Each structure stands twice: as C-alpha cells, then as structure tokens.
C-alpha cells in the first residue's frame, strides 16, 4: 500500500512524508508531532489504539484536520 501511495503522490506532484510507527503509540505521536512542524496541507492518520485521539487533537490545533 505504501508503494502505491508514494507512486500516486509523485504523479500528482505532491511531496509525501510516510511514517510507520510499527504499532507503537508513543512513536506515532512523536512522528506526528515532527510531521506537523513541517506545515503539511494534508495529514492522513491511521491511528494506533488509544493514541488516535491525541493525534486528532494535535492536527486540529494546527488547523489541518477536517471531518470527512
């Protein structure tokens, strides 16, 4: 799946930062904090257990999160 996302992003001219937290909530939170400092226009999260709510709050504070 990651390869497909990278390929399609490149075709559309987007720079992609893809992070794999390896099912580690603390790593995903840390990686998301780092990604948010880069000012992304879009953030796609696949949350790891209980850390998802914190990730959503972080994105909201940066004005990135939009409900589907």
Image: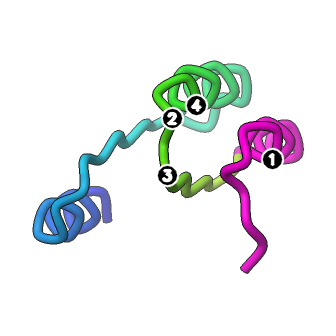
3D distance between C-alphas at marks 3 and 4:
10 Å
* Residue hosting label 2: 39
Q: Point out the tag, 3 or 4, that comes first from the N-terminus.
A: 4
10 Å crowding of disc 4: few (<14), some (14-19), many (20+): some
Query: Principal SS element in the magenta part?
Result: helix
Element carrying mark 4: helix
**Does 57 lie within the magenta span?**
yes
Q: Which residue is mark 4?
A: 36
Q: CA distance from mark 1 to mark 3?
A: 12 Å
Residue appearing at x 58%, y 31% in the figure:
36
C-alpha gap between disc 4 and disc 2: 5 Å
Q: Which residue is mark 1?
A: 60
Instruction: Give the class, few, some or many, for how many residues have Cα within 10 Å of label 1's Cα (few <14, many ≥20).
Output: few
Which contiguous range is marked in magenta?
48-68
Task: Place residue 29 in its image quadrant.
Answer: top right
Viewer-side residue, 45 vs 50? 45
Q: Position of residue 45 (x, y in %)?
A: 61, 53
On-image quarter of the N terminus: bottom left
């Amino acid at each position: 799946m990651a390869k497909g996302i990278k390929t399609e992003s490149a075709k559309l001219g987007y720079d992609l930062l893809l992070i794999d937290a390896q099912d580690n909530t603390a790593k995903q939170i840390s990686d998301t904090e780092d990604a948010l400092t880069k000012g992304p226009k879009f953030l796609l999260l696949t949350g790891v257990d209980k850390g998802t709510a914190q990730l959503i709050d972080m994105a909201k504070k940066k004005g990135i999160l939009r409900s589907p």
